[in-house]
Amino acid sequence: MNALVVATATLVCVAVVPYLAYIILYGWLQPSESPVQKKPREPTVSILLPTYNEERIIEQKLVSLCELDYPAEKIEIVVADSSDDGTATIVRDFFTDRDAPSLTLLEEGERRGVARAINDAMKQVSGEVVFRTDCDSRLAGDAVREAVANLADPDVAAATGRQVEVLGDSEVEEDYRDLIARLQSVESRLDSTFICHGPCFAFERAAFRPIAPDSLADDTEIGVSIRRGGDRVVMDPATRFVESGVSAFGERRTRKDRRAMGLIQLLVRNRDLLGRAGRYGRIILPFNWWFMIVSPWLGVAVTALATAAAVNLLGLIGLALPILAGLFLWLGQRDALGPLQPLHAVADAQISLLIAQVRLVMGDTSGTWTVDRDSREAFE
């Protein structure tokens, strides 16, 4: 048998086996609810909202926070603002003569990144629980109540939610979010989830430790820090939120590639946890290392070897293979793959992770977000 064919088949098996193991584990565990025994409780909650030039959507976000199914007297809204538009003025005016939760408005003189803003804000919050959220997201009315119910478990110090809808009619993003939610549900059953969602993330104030000022994934870094401290971090499907998304390849890159950079940065910085911290270090982190760091390069290698094998066997006709791969990506970003569409979510994620690794190696560690105007338009 042709050596290139053998090498390609071997590499495909190596690349596919971890996915098969995950699918088998998911089928065995069949996770569908919170992995812990939730108990109704009403601790004081500080809702932490970082903002930058959100004057078009901030009032709508504040209205939704005031309408949450939770006692207003037990809620403090902390806005960490670094805007140079009218966001801070709108926030102040909103709380004037209004029967609403208390407000703490922190105004930065300059924009220094979300991580620094959160570190500073955490010095000011007073709630027993901090609920981190974003302007370009929408929480279910009972999101805070459901989140804090998870924290009644003495082993759990943080809980993130599940995105139940993608505004903008993006099947690409819906498939990706569903993939992540399934991964999180398995991880939460085994021990703790790795990824935490900034739009919907609750944690005990006492469990917080300052995060790296240059962090590119502040929410997940908080979760990793909490797990490092000995407490669990879980994803509860009943804690629901909504974000926006688009399918077009170019429009997704800025947000997804930067997010991928943050996750890879965290894995590398916390590599000492591998093999430690129970199943978190023995199963969950190794799988995330494989999926986010190793698998993207395996994909490149499989494509290159398969193309070489096809050309070796079929001549120039073998070049049809990379052309078909490109067609697959092109159709996928247009939500036109039918039952194969979920596979595109995996491929698209791998592209982001590959780009992220290259950017990190090249020294790109910018700590500030580029405002995603497309995502905000869905909430206007």
Image (cartoon, grey):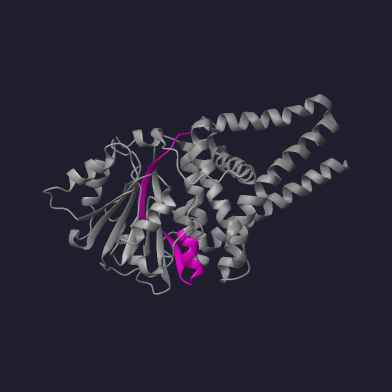
> At x 61% / y 32%, what residue is drawn?
328
Residue 149 image offset from top left, x and y in percent: 32, 66
Residue 217 image offset from top left, x and y in percent: 48, 51
Residue 237 in sight from this viewpoint: no
With 271 as the anchor, is 243 left or right in this view?
Answer: left
User: In this view, which residue lies farthest toward the left?
Assistant: 97
* Image-quadrant location for residue 38: bottom left
Instruction: Name the quarter where the N terminus is drawn.
Output: top right
Please name whichever residue, 248 or 263, is drawn nearer the observer in this view of the structure.
Answer: 263
The relative height of residue 268 versus residue 163 in the rendered view (above or below) is: below
Please name whichever residue, 66 or 248, is drawn nearer the observer in this view of the structure.
Answer: 66
Residue 113 image offset from top left, x and y in percent: 43, 47
* Image-quadrant location for residue 127: bottom left
> At x 72% / y 31%, what residue is drawn?
321
139 is within the stretch colored magenta: no
The relative height of residue 142 versus residue 88 in the rendered view (above or below) is: below
With 321 as the anchor, is 24 left or right in this view?
Answer: left
With 48 as the anchor, is 69 left or right in this view?
Answer: left
Residue 116 image offset from top left, x and y in percent: 42, 53
**Residue range highlighted in magenta:** 222-248
